[in-house]
Amino acid sequence: MEQKNNPLLVYTLLYFAFLYIPVLFLPIFSFNDANYMSFPLSGFTTEHYEEMWSKRNLHNALWASIKVGVVASVVSTTIALFAAKAFARYKFRGQNISYGAIMMPFLIPEIILAVSILIIWLSLGFKLGLVPVTIGHILFCTPFAMLILIARIEGFDFSLEEASRDLGENAWGTFYRVSLPLYLPGIIASLLLSFIISFDEFVLAFFLTGSDATLPMYMWAQMRFIQKLPHVLALGAVIIVFTTFIVLLAFWLRNLGQGKEKTEFGINIHE
Amino acid sequence: MLQAWKSLYAKSDPAKAFSLLSPALILVTLAMLVPMTLMLSFSFFTQISFTEIDYSFTIQRYIDFFQKNLLVSLLIKSVKISFIVTLVTLLTAYPVCYYIAFYVKKNKMLWLVLLTLPFWTSYLLRVFSWKIILGTKGVINSSLINAGLLSEPLTFLMYSETAVIITLTHAWAAFALLPLYVSLDKIDFSLIEAARDLGLSRLETFWKITLPLSLPGIIGAILIIFIPTVGDYVTPALLGGTDGRMLSNMIQAYFGKVNNLPLGAASATIMLITVAIVTIIVSYTTKKLSQRIS
């Protein structure tokens, strides 16, 4: 290990500033008493936050996002749990190609996924709305969920499951009493992170929602009007705080009961 | 009979693996492969009127695409912007990952969590925050005018290719940081020490040992940034203006107000083919490179 490298440390800190400062402007200007987001700040106000209580469209969009997010995270985590187990437990022919296929939605430009689902949905004669958005989100969240869960299940001692089976527990009993408690931190981390991905997702929602706006769609619509911008800033600031809290919780859970350091949400797909 | 199947199943690892994988594979097939195939077939149809489509086979949409200078130039611009973004993100992120991998001793995990945290906040909001910074009445312009350094706002900041590049570099940083860090952290530091002890300079050591060993992370980062940014829609729509428009914005128009689904599908297919070609080139070059090194 090297001793010290001060220029590199300074550079790293500047890079952190580059990552964080832009996002911090949202909360700063959300308390500013003006329609334009420019310096100097003109005065402190919480009125943009109070405004949120009275917006019906906002409440509907929030509710839509929660519904989509809950369904997408539960379904994608369940699907990913089975898949993660298959990859962590077995070596089999067709392993790489299956892995590649499941990871693909993560690697293809989102607009192409969105447009494809749009075409099939309209061809089948269905109406756009939250259902196709949810399907898109399940597709998009599953690779993430799988990476998180593989990181958790890898190195799991599968002889524990075998012992349980040998001692007469059936498959469900073994899953419920042995595997689930050990996987649980990973499962909750996956649920939380999938929810956040769905909650913040814009492109799929943009093509597929029709008239039922999700929260990012609502913000998109508001961004076009200068006088509504402060209100978007306040909403954005709340979303950022909420997201950060959930993500930190998920990170903490994921590392719970794990001695060794893991790769960050497992994005080492090129191994 | 059933018993026989059951015991055969119990002995077969692939059978068990594929039954566990089946929900995920069905999902990918029904929600991605089938829709994408349908999109491909739509690219061979013709839009007759606002609601009517002629389903007879023609490659005319592809000819249309390459005859429209706008579409070809947008494709080239998309690839160019993505290429620059990938390069800038890689070059700026590498030193940070190098520092965390080799100099940080305590709480590495915390550094990493802090690096990836902004990535989890809404993409739309991160892009929007650059609008606040670069806008005509935004942070940079209002600060410079207040300080008396400017009398008129700098208009080139906003609605330009540069704005799109800066914003995308910020938005996709995590995708470079993670693979780079993972590959650098795996390097056995005693190799670097050995190279130094044998008289190689810092630069030579980096060039001959560290850089080649971190190649997998570099390739990972290239693909994982280039592919999605080619098809980015939000950033050019919010910050690009006419100068920074990309192919996705036209695809969206064909599926929206222009209502030419077949041409939109053909444009999306061409985008996908471009991405595939780049992936193949990058993977092939890497293979050659890593063969030469080892």
Image: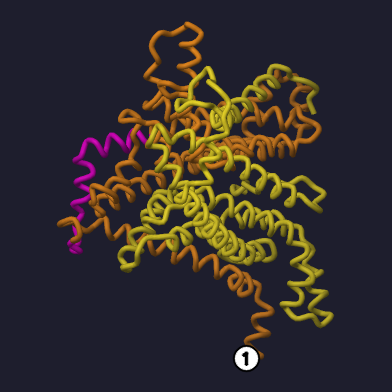
Chain colours: A yellow, B orange
- Residue A107 highlighted magenta (yes or no): no
Q: Chain of mark 1?
A: B
Q: Position of residue B261 (x, y in %)?
A: 26, 54
A53 lies left or right of B164:
right
Q: Is residue B287 visible?
A: no
Q: Which residues are magenta?
A: B54-79
Q: Secondary structure at mark 1?
A: helix
The residue at 32%/46% (across/down) is B252
Q: Residue furthest left?
A: B48
Q: Nearer the viewer, residue B35 or A50?
A: A50
Quadrant that contains the N terminus of chain A:
top right
| Residue placed most toward the observer, B186 or B108 | B108
Q: Amino acid at mark 1?
A: Leu
The answer to which image quadrant residue A9 occupies is top right
Q: Residue under label 1, please give it.
A: B2
Q: Is residue A24 left or right of residue B72?
A: right
Residue B129 appears in the figure: yes
* Residue B135 point in image, percent of width and height: 43, 24
Q: Main secondary structure of the magenta part?
A: helix
Q: Is residue B71 magenta?
A: yes
Tell me: residue B15, above or below residue A137: below
